[in-house]
Amino acid sequence: MTSRKTLVLVTGGAGFIGSHVTERALRLGYRVRVVDNLSTGDERNLAAFANQIEFIRGDLTDPAVCRNVVRGVDTVFHLAALPSVPRSMADPWGSHHHNVNATVQLLMACRDAGVRRLVYSSSSSVYGDTPVLPKVESMEVQPRSPYAAAKLAAEQYVLAFGRAGLVEGVALRYFNVFGPRQSPHSSYAAVIPAFFAAAQEGRTASINGDGQQTRDFTYVENVVAANFLAATGPSERVNGSVVNIGAGDRTSLLRLVELISEVTNREVRVDHAPPRSGDVRDSLASTDRAHAVLGYSPMVDLREGLGRTWQWFQESLGELTPTTIAR
Ligand SMILES: NC(=O)c1ccc[n+]([C@@H]2O[C@H](COP(=O)([O-])OP(=O)(O)OC[C@H]3O[C@@H](n4cnc5c(N)ncnc54)[C@H](O)[C@@H]3O)[C@@H](O)[C@H]2O)c1
């Protein structure tokens, strides 16, 4: 990944995080191909730079699509997934198919096409609900949803292909990513866009459970930076590694509501819904390995990230119509 003319593939590039990886790759001077089936993604996420990328609408569960999209590619940023715990509870097979089968198809295509490295977007959900904090990569994993199990399975395929010398692979376990372009519209909306939408529309925000549960909220720019460190780091350190990508700090949902009230200058009221099955109680990343393996440190903290995200919400006012966010 040395030449500025290097071609990179972003799977799931029309999604929230993938669109940011795409934008950064363009800024760094790479040629960028995006593949997305637009199941949860939206081409509008790519609108500002659509004429600078090659966009292929396709589904990675189809081996022919995988073979087509990896042609001439040096590095794959593999973000395509059905990223939802509740959705995986409702449809475990769909979760497995799009998260695991698609990844194995993609890996086989990468092997056959001589792709140098694949950077996989994994998830902190693989750790499950153990009380031990922070989560370190060496601890036992205990997925407690089909989504978490699928992310773990796909992650392990990526690492196994890497260690077997088929395609270099590295897995990044993200902790609760947030930022501009994260949709508040999905019935599975993540908590930060859901709270911002409530602030914007003057609605009561809904919290599943008592609100004392904690998360390591990670601004998207930190995750994007980690992807490029993982793509360019030396093989002997990076290949076959799994690393946490978080902010290394945890915040309760009730504290998050306070911060959102401060950032938006609007009082956000909350009501409480029953806890969601499959959710974990507390989450916090150890970023020691990410620092050692990738040279990663979070650059944007929660408050700064919330400010930037709120700015985006306001600028997008016309596009983000009031919505019913599932409770
Ligand atoms: N957002 C988070 O907090 C978070 C946390 C941990 C891990 N992750 C992982 O990061 C990645 C990106 O998540 P996101 O939040 O940007 O979600 P997203 O839904 O915005 O992006 C996923 C993209 O993948 C596409 N896609 C799904 N199945 C596909 C298929 N079979 N073929 C082609 N495209 C397909 C979707 O249309 C969408 O554009 C996912 O792998 C997710 O598991 C996200």
Image (tube, rainbow, N blue to C red):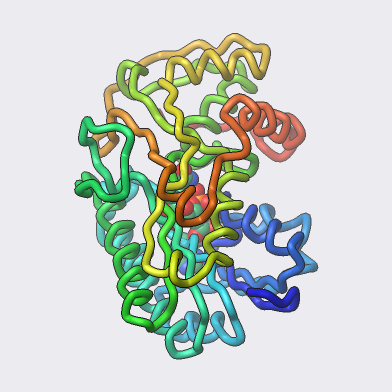
What percent of the width, then of the height, locates residue 211? Answer: 36, 18
Residue 40 can be seen, yes or no: no
Q: Residue 147 vs residue 130: left or right?
A: right
For image coordinates 46% across by 82% down, the residue present is: 110
Tell me: residue 99, above or below residue 264. below
Q: Quadrant of residue 278?
A: top left
What percent of the width, then of the height, locates residue 288? Answer: 42, 44
Q: Looking at this view, is 128 or 162 the one in front?
A: 162
For image coordinates 48% across by 62% down, the residue present is: 80
> Which residue occupies the extreme bottom position in the image?
112
Tell me: residue 91, above or below residue 189. below
Q: Quadrant of residue 3?
A: bottom right
Tell me: residue 81, above or below residue 317. below
Residue 65 can be seen, yes or no: yes
For image coordinates 50% across by 87% down, the residue present is: 114
Q: Residue 51 vs residue 16: left or right?
A: right
Numbered disc total: 0
What percent of the width, then of the height, locates residue 280? Answer: 28, 34
Q: Looking at this view, is 84 or 217 the one in front?
A: 217
Q: Looking at this view, is 14 or 18 the one in front?
A: 18
Q: Looking at this view, is 180 or 186 the one in front?
A: 180
Quadrant where the C terminus lies? top left
What percent of the width, then of the height, locates residue 122? Answer: 40, 55
For image coordinates 60% across by 59% down, the residue present is: 14
Quadrant where the N terminus lies? bottom right
Q: Quadrant of residue 85?
A: top left
